[in-house]
């Protein structure tokens, strides 16, 4: 499940790699582009259910889908996006500014700035093209606004979280979107759950690159 301002097509190379290995892949799309949203659902048939969620994607999944996961990969994700204390006030202020920009002549500049931060420390060219920068539809704008509100209020692991399954958490120490305190709170909230943490000093927030995919596949191979 992609995060805020993301799209299912971003994960095409992941899908290809998994399907080449014989897995069945199901992509979810929030529909920020204004088209029809694709609801989360597990592919039919036998086999393990691996959930891969990036950033806010964890909080966009229905409880019934979460509860059926046999293993979870969390990429640049969080239980609470807005941390406590002074850092949280700064994050909340930034979210409010993003909400205020939607629907104004500043919205495309805001989205461009967000995508630059998501790509950091790499150039924007490292990310797939962003259709949202060609203009928002009213429905796409509404969904982005709703999910900014969700970013502001999420405070814990979501309802339906599968507490006993193995989890891989991948974090980039140069993440310019998720505050370090929020990244650490996720680890704390996972408690005694079987957890593998992969934290890389050279990675940022857009954890969709081939090196990240290799980390995920090595972890799966060891389960």
Image: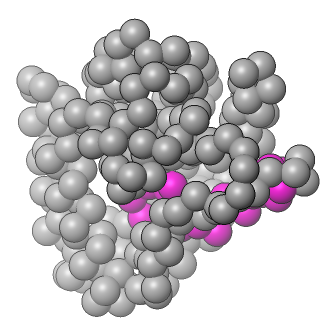
Front position in the image: 72 or 150: 72
Does the stretch in magenta take in 121?
A: no
In the displayed structure, would residue 55 be above or below residue 83? below
Front position in the image: 159 or 100: 159
Q: Residue at x 50, y 74 (%)?
A: 38
In the displayed structure, would residue 61 be above or below residue 101? above
In the displayed structure, would residue 104 be above or below residue 163? below
Does the stretch in magenta take in 17?
A: yes
Which SS does the magenta portion mostly show? Answer: helix
What's the magenta region? Answer: 1-19
Q: Residue at x 41, y 86 (%)?
A: 34
Q: Is residue 125 visible?
A: no
Q: Residue at x 49, y 44 (%)?
A: 68
In the displayed structure, would residue 165 be above or below residue 138? above
**Where is residue 223 drawn, in percent x and y?**
72, 21
For this orientation, the residue located farthest to the front is 46
């Amino acid at each position: 499940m992609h995060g805020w301002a993301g799209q299912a097509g971003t994960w095409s190379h992941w899908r290809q790699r998994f399907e080449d290995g014989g897995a069945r892949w199901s992509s979810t799309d929030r529909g920020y582009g204004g088209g029809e949203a694709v609801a989360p659902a597990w592919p039919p048939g036998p086999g393990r259910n691996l959930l891969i969620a990036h950033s806010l994607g964890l909080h966009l999944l229905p409880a019934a889908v979460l509860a059926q996961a046999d293993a979870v990969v969390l990429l640049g994700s969080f239980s609470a996006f807005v941390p406590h204390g002074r850092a949280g006030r700064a994050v909340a202020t930034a979210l409010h500014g993003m909400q205020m920009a939607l629907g104004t002549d500043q919205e495309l500049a805001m989205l461009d700035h967000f995508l630059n931060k998501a790509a950091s420390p790499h150039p924007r060219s490292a990310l797939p093209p962003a259709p949202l920068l060609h203009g928002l539809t009213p429905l796409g704008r509404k969904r982005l606004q709703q999910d900014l509100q969700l970013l502001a209020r999420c405070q814990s692991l979501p309802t339906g979280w599968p507490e006993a399954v193995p989890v891989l958490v991948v974090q980039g120490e140069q993440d310019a979107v998720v505050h370090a305190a929020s990244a650490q709170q996720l680890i704390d909230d996972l408690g005694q759950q079987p957890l593998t943490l992969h934290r890389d000093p050279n990675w940022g927030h857009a954890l969709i690159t081939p090196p990240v995919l290799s980390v995920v596949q090595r972890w799966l191979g060891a389960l």
